[in-house]
Image: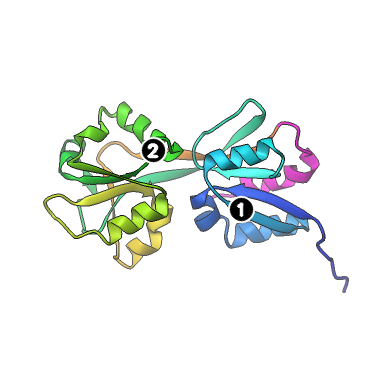
Amino acid sequence: MKTILKTESFRLGTTYIVGSYILPGKLNENINTITQSIINVSISNCIDVIAKLQTKELDLGIIETPTFHKDIIAKEWIEDEMVICSNIELDSFIDKKELHRYKLICQKESSPINKLIHRFFQKIDVSHRDFYSISKIDNTTASIQSVRWSKPNPEHPTITIVSSRAIEDEVKYRRLFMSRIKDYPMIRNFYIVYHKDVDMKKIENIIKELMNYSS
């Protein structure tokens, strides 16, 4: 049996949800097989992934929110649902008129995810100011943990809005709970991104594998 020594590396940059909840497992194994390379995965935010593609520090990126540049080509990938996360069981579907009761933990205004949620709120005629209170946090992990360890308050529940993938295990074991805004699903797309001058031979088979993937 011939042993294949992997000497080249493939540099893949992802954002938190993709790198933590989608890539591990079969998808990562398939990419490994296709490239016959050592896969170096770095997890950061959308802006950082795009910046590293521009400077050729990454071969390929997968991001959660559309943060684009003229030198970057983006392809829509799989869909992802954003949901309301709480530490007490709420109604499965919450009327948007009830949001004024909730304490919202969100990411900083400059973050791509906060901008995405802001655009969604605009579409359904909701404002961050409609909530009982607002707290701002640095990242998804911090917002989830802040909700989990906040004092349960049925009158003014503490919530955050995150990818359903990020809290699957917490919901399964009833450490956290998931709700949706009634009649207004929060659906977004992930994006495969790469520099327009990249060597396509290096990434085309990986892109095909990703495009054939269904979660």
**SS at circle 1:** strand
Q: Which residue is disc 1 drawn over?
A: 42
Camera-side residue of 89 and 41: 41
Q: Position of residue 167 (x, y in %)?
A: 38, 57
Drawn side of residue 60 relative to residue 201, left or right: left
Look at the image and say whether residue 212 sits in the magenta stretch.
yes
**Type of secondary structure dominating the magenta stretch:** helix
Q: Residues within 10 Å of mark 1 (few under 14, many from 20)?
A: some
Which residue extends farthest bottom? 1
Quadrant where the N terminus sits is bottom right
Drawn side of residue 107 relative to residue 42, left or right: left
Q: Which residues are magenta?
A: 196-215
Which residue extends farthest top? 70
Q: Is residue 215 visible?
A: no
The three-letter code of the residue at mark 2 reads Asn
Q: Position of residue 62 (x, y in %)?
A: 58, 44
Q: Splitting the image into 4 quarters, where does residue 176 fall? A: bottom left
Camera-side residue of 157 and 83: 157
The three-letter code of the residue at mark 1 reads Ser
Q: Position of residue 43 (x, y in %)?
A: 56, 52
Tell me how the rendering is colored. rainbow
Drawn side of residue 106 relative to residue 199, left or right: left
Camera-side residue of 107 and 116: 107
Q: Which residue is disc 2 drawn over?
A: 114
